């Protein structure tokens, strides 16, 4: 399987994996599965870090290097992803989450999220 991790799940996987359900952690540790992070998540972390949100205090250079060293794949944001956000229902207004949903749909990835609103969208989304 190919998993796109939403921002919170990405941060948990990198720093506090015990916050992730053991069955999901097992999937993340399975070398047969591809783990993917979005540049949109890095943008979100950078913004929330600059706002001094304690839950987003992380060194982005270190996080990126660590993810790549652990064979995560980086997914850039494309114009196709941006265009897809226009067809999403409007019940979730967070632009970063909407981008991750669009990327999962366009790229046929399973988005792992802890956000109940994100999980309401149809498509390849799994609430953890």
Image: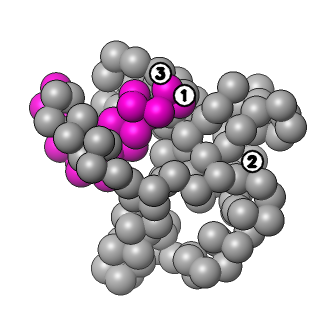
Assign a secondary structure to mark 1.
strand
Confirm or deny contact between disc 1 and disc 3 (CB under 8 A). yes
Assign a secondary structure to mark 3.
loop
Q: Where is residue 21 in the image (x, y as percent from the top left)?
A: 70, 33
Q: Is residue 29 left or right of residue 111?
A: right
Separation of marks 3 and 2 at Cα, in angstroms: 24 Å
Residue range (magenta): 89-109
Q: Is residue 101 above or below residue 79?
A: above
Q: Which colour scheme is used?
A: one colour
Q: Position of residue 88 (x, y in %)?
A: 20, 29
**Residue 110 got which mark?**
1
Residue placed under numbered mark 3 in the picture: 124
Q: What residue do we see at 71% from left, 31% from top?
A: 24
Q: Position of residue 115 (x, y in %)?
A: 41, 36
Answer with mark 1 or mark 3, whichever residue precedes in sequence.
1
Q: What residue do we see at 55% from left, 40% from top?
A: 4
Query: Which SS type dominates the magenta stretch?
Result: helix
Q: What residue do we see at 74% from left, 47% from top?
A: 18
Q: In which quarter of the image is residue 120?
A: top left
Separation of marks 1 and 3 at Cα, in angstroms: 5 Å
Q: What residue do we see at 70% from left, 62% from top?
A: 67
């Amino acid at each position: 399987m190919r998993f796109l991790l939403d921002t919170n799940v990405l941060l948990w996987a990198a720093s506090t994996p015990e916050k992730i359900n053991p069955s999901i952690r097992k999937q993340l540790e399975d070398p047969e599965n591809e783990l993917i992070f979005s540049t949109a998540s890095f943008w979100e972390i950078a913004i929330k870090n600059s706002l001094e949100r304690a839950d987003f205090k992380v060194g982005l250079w270190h996080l990126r290097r660590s993810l790549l060293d652990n064979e995560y794949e980086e997914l850039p944001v494309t114009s196709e992803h941006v265009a897809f956000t226009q067809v999403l229902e409007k019940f979730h207004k967070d632009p970063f989450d909407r981008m991750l949903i669009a990327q999962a749909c366009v790229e046929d990835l399973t988005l792992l999220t802890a956000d109940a609103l994100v999980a309401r969208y149809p498509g390849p989304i799994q609430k953890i």
